[in-house]
Amino acid sequence: MNLAGAPVAADIATVVLTTVFFLPYYAIIASAYCQLRDGGNVPDRSTSKPVNTSQVSEL
């Protein structure tokens, strides 16, 4: 059994697996950053009606 190429194969496997798993993660982070930077897809949280607290029980 020849183990001379084992470290090289392990390094290649590590690079491939890291790319496969982290590429979608980095894409999500970049998309979130662009949305926050550009202000896109920001829900309108303002309301024209005030909240009715008369029916809310006290803690």
Image (spheres, helix red, strand yellow):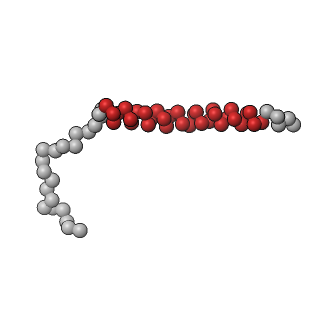
Quarter-of-image position of residue 41: top left
Quarter-of-image position of residue 8: top right
Q: Position of residue 56 (x, y in %)?
A: 18, 62
**For this rendering, which residue is in front, 52 or 20?**
20
Q: Position of residue 7 (x, y in %)?
A: 75, 37
Residue at position x 29%, y 34% in the image: 39
| Residue furthest right as drawn | 1
Compared to 33, does 58 lie above or below?
below
| Residue furthest bottom as drawn | 59
Q: Position of residue 48 (x, y in %)?
A: 12, 44
In which quadrant is the N terminus drawn? top right
Quarter-of-image position of residue 58: bottom left
Residue at position x 58%, y 33% in the image: 19
In which quadrant is the C terminus drawn? bottom left
Residue at position x 44%, y 35% in the image: 28
Compared to 52, does 9 lie above or below?
above
| Residue furthest front as drawn | 37
- On the rendered structure, is 59 left or right of 29? left
- On the rendered structure, is 48 left or right of 12? left
How many marks are shown on the rendered structure? Answer: 0
